[in-house]
Amino acid sequence: MLLSDLASYAAHVSPAAYCQLFYVLAAATVLAIAATPESIQSLLTGYGARSLNANGEEGKQASNGPLVRIISWVTSVGKVPHSWFMHFYLLSLSCSAFWMLQFLYHGSALEFIVRNQAPSEKTPMSINQVILAWVLMSLQGGRRLYEYVAVMRSSSSKMWIIHWLLGMAFYFCTNISIWLEGSGKYYDGALVLGFLKCNHIGSIQSSGRRSLSIEMPSLNVILGVLIFLSSWVMQYRCHRYLARLKKYSLPEDGLFRYLVCPHYTCECVLYASLALVAAPKDQLYNRTLVCAVLFVAVNLGVTAKGTKKWYGEKFGREKVQGKWAMIPGIF
């Protein structure tokens, strides 16, 4: 009886709620790991340069406790190349293309999401907001893929496969999330409207013959786009600067004079601005994407803290003492 009740409840939970749950649980898991002893935390969260010693070799744990040895074995078994980060952006762009095709050609995947999401949305996003959020997400995925192919230098370091799986899940959910809270605009009773076939540029044929309306963007949308594009450019500059540095040297120019990881700061701002752009009517932000921002901030915050510690040990604490790890004035 309990299982049937749970199944019935799960069937009535909206897709947006499932995405929000993923982000919150993932952020809570990262925080829980960050609260573990350093010997365990470094095994679970360390990757790239932070997992290497001063000689560029994989560091060994000083502790020989049984728990540390077990975790060390588990994390060593599932090591994958750090270059697999590129898969995140390949997936993101693939998802962007997939959901747009679903939108244009009445795809069954989007129809399923719409039917389950729309009834729970009282003030959905406009179609224009959905398309704009899709464009911005596509820009981010495209630029990050370009950086990994043409800007960033290859690395022989490894990361635990859980990091890779978590990143893949994040980009998969986020590409779904930008469509979710506009579902009410596609939905009319039992019919999915507004995205069956393209008649011509700017118009979409549906069973109700509705057109894609042109409306003035809200202050939220204008502000969100401006912040997104500014952070988008700044993050690219940070990554280009890091790529030009001598391997494992201390970045000190530009935003790196004030922050240890300004590229992480830009990442958080990018998704926060996306939450503004995709805010449903009469709401300040998109709830699902704010949950995504929570995960990004927690996940990158833990990494930024570890990076600041690693820089301090390698180059001297005085070199990073006056810098914030990621969030100016806070962290």
Image (spheres, rainbow, N blue to C red):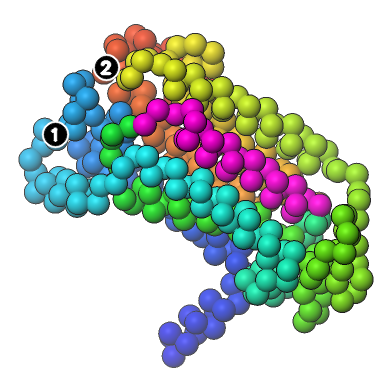
Residue 168 seen: yes
For residue 109, which quarter of the picture?
bottom right
Residue sitting at 72 percent across and 64 percent down?
A: 103
Range covered by the magenta-colored residues? 128-154
Q: Can the viewer see residue 29?
A: no
For the N terminus, which image quadrant?
Answer: bottom left
Residue at the image point whose x is 68% and y is 34% from the top:
228
Identify which residue is drawn at 29% across, 12% down. Answer: 315
Point out residue 255 in the picture as x, y percentages from the top left corner. 54, 17
Residue 118, placed above or below residue 330: below
Q: Point out the residue furthest to the bottom here.
A: 1
The single residue placed furthest to the top in the displayed view is: 318
Q: Nearer the viewer, residue 218 or 195?
A: 195
- According to the picture, the residue beneath numbered tag 1 turns out to be 60
Q: Check residue 170 in the rendering and tell me which mark sits there, or answer none.
A: none
Q: Indicate the quadrant where residue 201 lies.
A: bottom right
